[in-house]
Amino acid sequence: MLCPRRLFVSVTLVMMVVANLYVLHLMLTTTRSGVSRGFGDYNYVKGDFPILSGIISHIKAEPERPARYETATTLHKRLEALRHECDFRNMSKPLDFKNLPRFSWPWIYVSRKYKLLYCQIPKVGTTNWLKIFAKLQMKVDPESKVEEINNAHNIKLELLSYLRPAERDEVLRDYTKFLVVRDPFERVLSAFKDKLEWRRELKGPMFRKLASTIVDRYRKKGNLTNDGFNRITKVPRFEEFLRFVVDPSSTDVEMHYSEPRHWLPQHKLCYPCNIDYDYLLRIDNISDEADFLLNEVGIPDKVRYPNSTSKSPYNEMLPAYFSNVSPDVVNALYHYYELDYRLFGFDVPPQF
């Protein structure tokens, strides 16, 4: 028989071993299934998408709704491809607000009621999403239709950057997060037509000062356009704008900080490898995918993304606009946006 002292020591040792084994079990379980989502300690776990995985498991038993299942699996595969690319490029690292330049912070809108976060990328259906968040944040008449909301960009909406660090991290961890992306070449064409082409109602380009700067930098003899009121306005050609986009020295041009957001690579605006997004939508199928997302987070049917045609008119314009762009500029533009193509799974232009 063991003496009381030896018995006590033996029991203590056994308890310590059991406790250590239990702690090890918890650590392994957390490593396999837990994801710290958002900023801070980001633990990348390949293929772990709790929201979409749960949805897919649930609707497998709904054969009468094949479209919903197809959308869910498409979104899941898209996230898998994104994570794989981020992992392959060793980009899945924490994003530290403290060391991030203020004007480089992502523009993430917050719906507290539905625990939803939307990262805004200009020229990717942004106006409609701002209208939706204006309704979700009760900044407009709740009875108004999304299509009827005016001046959406002038409505002051709550952004993630307004929150204190502790609350910001909590929201990033617990809320559903999504972003919407667009084919890069189509998006840069949209930016050009909206901001730098001649607009009759403005009697010039929207970004008038930048337009003048581009003409001065990339055209030996400015082709000046008379606006009909004896005023001369400089309007850049599409190739001149693209040269400005891919020119490393263009960062020295004085602009409002929001202007280059219209053509900067999308991954530089929303950090898809550093924030654990639950949904990655694409503008080319936005009606179905937005409807799926809004349904899943419990938003009423009366708040829906406006109907959108499946084919963008800008996609049809691409051949005409790019036919006048020299191959060296097109090549430089592709390499400027290459990571967007790879991360988001867009079809790479045939020549590349």
Image (spheres, grey):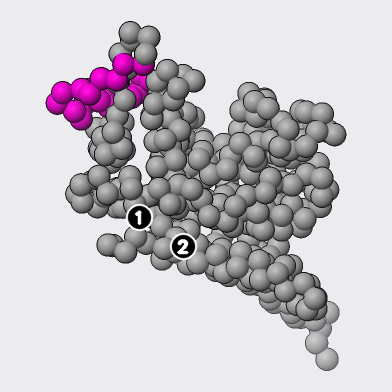
Q: Is residue 210 above or below residue 279?
A: above
Q: Which residue is the site of mark 2?
A: 345
Look at label 2 and name its amino acid. Gly
Q: Is residue 36 above or below residue 25?
A: above
Residue at figure coordinates x 26%, y 39% from the top left: 239
In the image, taking residue 94 as reference, residue 316 lies left or right, namely left
Residue at figure coordinates x 85%, y 34% from the top left: 143
Q: Is residue 178 above or below residue 122?
A: below
Q: Quadrant of the C terminus?
A: bottom left
Q: Is residue 298 visible?
A: yes
Position of residue 61 measured from the top left corner of the image (x, y, whole percent) = 80, 78
- The numbered mark, 2 or 1, whose residue comes first in the sequence reads 1
In the image, taking residue 152 as reference, residue 208 lies left or right, namely left
Q: Quadrant of the N terminus?
A: bottom right
Position of residue 187 measured from the top left corner of the image (x, y, whole percent) = 44, 45
Position of residue 337 measured from the top left corner of the image (x, y, whole percent) = 36, 50
Disc 2 element: loop
Q: Which residue is the site of mark 1?
A: 338
Tell me which segment is drawn in magenta.
207-227
Q: Is residue 87 visible?
A: no
Mark 2 surroundings within 10 Å by alpha-carbon count, few (fewer than 14), some (14 through 19), many (20 or more):
some
Residue that sits furthest to the left in the current view: 220
